[in-house]
Each structure stands twice: as C-alpha cells, then as structure tokens.
Amino acid sequence: MGKGTRSWISSWKIELRLITRSRWTWIMLALGLAMVGIQFFSRMGTDDPGLALHATAFIVAGGIFVSLVAGLALIRREQADAAEEVFGVLPAGPSSKAGGKVLALLTMVAAFLALSLWAVFALFAWREVPGVFYGRATAYLLLYWAVPFVIAGLIGMAVGIWVKSRLVYLLFAAIWVLIGPFNLSLMEQAMVTFAVDLTAPLAWLNLGQTDPNAPYDPVYGLPMEIRRWVQKGVWLLVAVCLLLLALKRRGAVLLVPLVLAIPLLVLYNQESQVVNTRYEADSVQRNDWLYYRDHGQPAFAADDSYRITAYDIDLRTHRLLQADVTMEVVPERAVREIVFTLYHQLRVRDVKVQGKAAAFEQREDQVRVTFAETVAEGQVQNVRVSYAGISSPAFFANEQAVLLPAYFPWYPQEGSRQAMTLRGADLIRNGPDELYGQAPEREVSYSLRYDGPQPMYTNLTGSGKAPNGLTVTAGPLTERMVGGTRVVLPDSFYRGAAQVPGFLRDQAAYRSEIERDLGLPEREAASQVFFLSVPRETVSDPDLEWHLGDHSIVSVTQMFNHGGLFADRYLIASSALNEAVRTPEYLAQSGEMRMLFQRAYLYGYGTRNGWYRANDRPPLKIVAEDDLRVKNKEGSENTRKLISYLDQHMHDRAEMQAFFRAWLAEMNGGTPVDWPRMLGLLEKK
C-alpha cells in the first residue's frame, strides 16, 4: 500500500471519527430511516412494491438537500473541530484531506443505503413480495438514492470551498430546486408566467424520479433505462470536475473526468426510447394525442389489392425498435404499387423486392412501395422492409421491456390506415378489419427471431400461424397454465394471480350471454390470455379486453394485484360488453351515448342476475341523479324514462333482447344517435 493510499485512509478514519461524534449525524440518520419505514409501510399495504419504490420522491428530495449540507459540513468541519492542524502533519496533507472527505461522503451514503435496504427487505418479507423485487429495489435505490446523494454531496463540498458566507444556504436552496425530483412542479408556474418550456433542461437537471406521481407499470417495470444511468454518470463526472476546480487542481487530474464524460455523452445522445409520463411532448399522455390531432387521415388511399400470406421478422429492441421484415405479398389483381401500414415513428431505411432495391415513400402511418414493373395477379413477391425508430410510448420497445400488441402496426400490416384516431378525448386504436368482423379471419404464417429483454412471450404456437396478427411482449412477466388456457401476466401479481381462474371463468360466461342477448356471432374463448398494461382507449368505455381470436389481451394495472378487481363482476361484464360491440361505427358515437348503452344493458343484466341490493345505486341511476344535480332536468327525465322501461320489462328476455339489438343497430348505423332517436326506440316498443 503506497503512502498516498495510507494517507487517504488515515484522513478517512479521522473524518469518520468526527462524523460519528456529532449528534446531528445520528439525528439525521434516525429521521431518514423513520421516513423510509413510514413510506414503505404505507405503500406496501396496497401490495404494490413498485409504487413503494417509485413514490419515494420526498425522501430523495430531502436526501439531496441533506447531502448538499453534509458536503458543506465536511469541508468546514476541521475549522469547527480544530482538526486542520492534524491534516497539516499528514503526508500529502491537502490531497489526503480531500480524499478522506470524499471517502467519508461515500461511506455515509453507503451506510444509509444499506440500512434503508435492510428496512425495505424486511417489509418485502413481511408482505411476501417475490424475490425478484429485491434485486430491482437494490438497483433502483442505487440509481435514484445513492448516486444523487453522492453527486449532491460533491456539489456541496465544491460550493462550500467557493462560498464562505451564509449565502451558501440560499445557493443550496436554488440548487436543490433545480436538481431535485420536484423541479418541474416548482418551476411550472414560472414557465406559464414567462411562456417558456423548460421541460427538457429540467429533466436533464433532475437527479431524482422524473414523475413521482406516476403509478407503477407492471409490464414496463421501474424506470431504469440505460439513458437514466448514463445521465447520472455524466452528472457524477461533472460534480467531480467542480470539486477539482474548487480544490484548484489542474492538468491531467482534471482531464480524466472530462475525457470519461465524452463517451457517456455520445451514449446519451444516441436514439433511445425512454417512457415519460408527465408533460413531455413524447410522454404517454401527449405523444400520440398531439400527433393524431393533426394527422387524422391516411396519406394514401385504402389498398386492398394484395394479401400478405407470410412474415419473416428479425426484431431487435436495444434502446429502440429495429426490424428487418420479409413479407410474401400476393397481388389479388395486377398492381404496380402497394401501400401498407407502419407506425410513423418507425422510419423505413430501405425496401427490397425480390432482392432488389425498390422505390418507396413513407408518409403518416403508411408506406407506399413501387414495383419495377407491373406484377400480375397471384405472382408472389418477396418484399423486405428494414426500419428502426422509437415506438409509441403506449406500446414501448427498448432494452427494458416490450409491449407490442398485434393490433398496433409495429410491423408492416395490410391496408392503409392511421394506427389511431382522435375523437375528442378518446384515442381509438384502429386495428385491421378482421378484428371488427368486417373481413374474414385468415391464418398467416410468422417466423420470429428476437433479440431484446427477457423473458419474451408471443402468441405464436408450434404451427407458427396466427389469425389476427402477432403480439410480442417482454419484461417482468411470467407464464402459467390455468386449465387449458395459457396465461401471461406480470410477475408483480403475486396476490392477484390467484384470482385469474375465476376471472377467466366469469369473463367467458359474461361474453357468451352478451353475444346471445345482442345477436352477435358467438366466439370461442381465446386459448391464450395476456394480462398487459395497455392504456385505455376511451374515457367512457371500460376497454379491458381485446379479443384477437387465438389470444386476447386484457388491460391491467398494478391495482389488480390488490383489492379484488379480478373478481369485480361489473368491471368484467362491462369490459366484455365493450369488447363485443366494438366496431368503428360504434366507437364513432358520442361517449355519452356509448356509456348510456353500456349502463342500460348492465342495469338490466345485473338486476336479472341479482347484483343489486335494495339500497344500491346502479350506475344508470347515478347518471339520472348526476344530471339532476347539474340542473340537466331534461337529461335526468330521459334517463328515468329509460329506467322505467327497463324496470317494466326486466324479466321479459325476448323484449330486452329486441330492444338492445335495435339500439345497437342504430349505434352501428353510421349516423349519430341522440336522445330523441333513442327515445324513439322506446316509443316503438
């Protein structure tokens, strides 16, 4: 061991003695651990370990400020404790003094992290959280607690050297606002006042969670993408540079962190999908809404001149989606060009037809490929499309997780359509016609090679064929068999999983009865069910399920792990109803009328099946009461007329079936249905 190392260790030991003698050290440690215990204890009551970790912004904010002050205290400690003379007699005194202080800072952060993890693991064991969460919690606290605390401590040391007066605390307050997890919330009013958007720079400055209020996504998991680690790494090197400058170190010593920062900045600036959930333009809430607000129509006319009979897909999802897809295209008449649908952010790099480069044009969610010459009917063409880009934040694909449902055009799909349509506040997904029963289902062959996060799950079986497209998902998921049904669900559903068999049984029973009541074609239950965190399409419809023939996708949140949502009969029945009647024409109706149809049907269905007790308030009656409360007397009276009719004919099954079939036919008629038209159906009865 060299003299320099021994002097650092000696300085470190002195610093630790001074730290442990201070009562403030133990007071702050006790308060911090108390906050950790209270935070996790309160959150774990909902069986949501992800949210318990994610919602620690107050601890992170407090820890950053304490770390700033701790860095200042380390710099000024020898003055207060008369230790400066001791450091002066050590070999390489000034250098060892600074090194010892940095080691002491690292020791304090490591000790707090270790004790916090012990408390968290104890609560996890008490709530029977699966073992996989222990490793995730360690990585999360390292990224969002330990590294930010070290960075803040280094900044506090540098500022303490530069600023000798008490103004340092005002400066700390300003720094804390800028680098803490609440920086966007605290600066929001200023951005509105001065009409300036600081979202991007504030996101870069933020050392904590980007959205402390975001619920835990059971498929995406904790937000720990590569870019977030790289950002913390760059910040750490910046903090080291600031401290070196404050210590008046120049030359090669200062050059080292600057050189190390270069590859990190290059890595940070590479195209990469980071799922944002707040005000960012590319967030889950805004990205697609803003785009389809201004891009509602396909760029090219509908194209039914060909069919795709087979796909060979090479999919890679490291930081972004990259794919090479070869399709067997069969023209149904002589064609010179074809148009297919592909999500607009997935940019086509090249297209080859029969191995030769082909001209193409990509606009909106469509790609038009022009053949070298007219292709005759039935003459199979091998069309290879290479593309890459950032997928929709709702349907993500990166190094952390993948959520690519079959109805989302993450790979080239037949026809010309926008992936989504904005109707008011509703962002409707436009699946292929087969999903709406407006075209016959056709089994298509798929070959998939995948390179991305594991484990990966897809609806492909041994035959390699699927009737309604290919779903690929990967991340914190698990698989099990429930009876004869293959179930894929988040591994965070360690309690809710026990309710899945009952959910599948009730769902199948409700769907079958709804299809008979409404005169819809009866479908078999899917042999595979994927429980995924698919965002809602509409405000008014409980769109819990997409039935895709061979498999279905059930939209879930982490709340399904706690609170009995898998056993909520109204939720299950309403989502089965919404899935059964989903057509483009139905979804084009107003949200008010769709909600009225659903609540009216389920009022009758629930009453017949004994759902409601004497004093219960079914959702349809709540509509009438709410209308009266907001002084919409006409709306309330109309709803009461509907309730009166339903009460009168409740147990006349044939009458109820005829009424709701007629109402659904009106909803699918292509023209808006309003109260007068709906009441007209009552008068006909």
Image (spheres, helix red, strand yellow):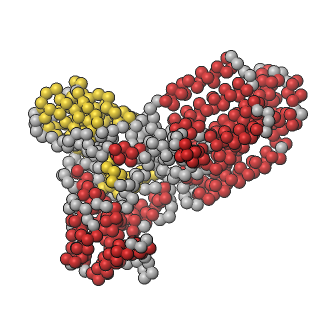
Toward which corner of the image does residue 684 lie, by quadrant? bottom left
Query: In the picture, which quadrant includes the C terminus?
Result: bottom left
Toward which corner of the image does residue 344 lie, by quadrant? top left
Query: In the picture, which quadrant includes the N terminus?
Result: top right
Relative depth, front residue between 174 and 191: 191
Toward which corner of the image does residue 75 lie, by quadrant? top right
Relative depth, front residue between 383 and 391: 391
Q: Residue at x 47, y 46 (%)?
A: 220
Image spot of residue 77 (x, y percent): 83, 36
Q: Would you place residue 515 above or below residue 302 in this image?
A: below
Report if residue 204 is visible in the image: yes
Image spot of residue 242 (x, y percent): 68, 28
Q: Residue furthest top?
A: 251
Residue 428 appears left or right of 307: right
Relative depth, front residue between 163 and 665: 163
Image spot of residue 279 (x, y percent): 49, 46
Residue 683 appears left or right of 230: left
Image spot of residue 571 (x, y percent): 40, 65
